[in-house]
Structures are given as structure tokens and as C-alpha cells.
Image: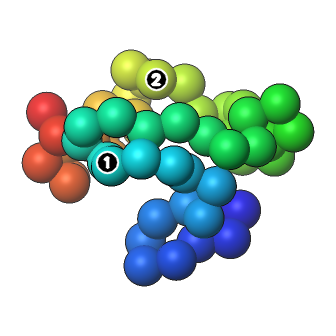
Amino acid sequence: MRCHDNRCSALDGTVGSGTSCLVYEIRPQVCRDCLPGDGECLEARAAYGFV
């Protein structure tokens, strides 16, 4: 996906408050492979202070 300032350009909303994907139905495989709550997700959340 294209990113702008370390944020996916298809992400709508405020990170840490509420977001949604604007292209969810046609999202790329890299997004489909990311599962909420898996190891990589928890690591990324911790790195950005969203624990």
C-alpha cells in the first residue's frame, strides 16, 4: 500500500482512537496477512505506544 508519513493512505480515522480501511474488500495480500492481535500486531502496537 502507499503510505504517507508512516501511515497507510487507505487508513481512515485517527490511529489509537478509531480507524477503518477504505479499500478493505480489495486490500493487498500484505494487509490480509496482518491479523489483529498476532505477534507482529502486538509488537507494532507496543512500538507506537498502543498497548
Q: Nearer the viewer, residue 43 or 19?
A: 19
Where is residue 13 shown, x and y percent of the image? Answer: 42, 47
Q: Say the numbered circle drawn on residue 26.
A: none
The spot of residue 20 in percent (x, y) is: 53, 36
Q: Quadrant of residue 32?
A: top right
Q: Is residue 42 visible?
A: yes
Q: Identify the residue shown where x is 39% and y is 20%.
A: 37
Label 2 element class: loop
42 relative to 49, above or below: above
Residue 29 visible in the current orientation: no
Q: Which residue is mark 1?
A: 15
Q: Is residue 34 above or below residue 30?
A: above
Q: Quadrant of the C terminus?
A: top left
With 48 as the anchor, is 44 left or right in this view? right
Q: Residue at x 51, y 49 (%)?
A: 12
Say which label, 2 or 1, has the lower sequence index. Answer: 1
Farthest residue, direction front? 13
Looking at the image, is 5 positioned above or below residue 17? below
* Closer to the eye: label 2 or 1: 1
Number of callouts = 2
Q: Nearer the viewer, residue 43 or 26?
A: 26
Quarter of the figure with residue 1? bottom right
According to the picture, the residue beneath numbered tag 2 turns out to be 36
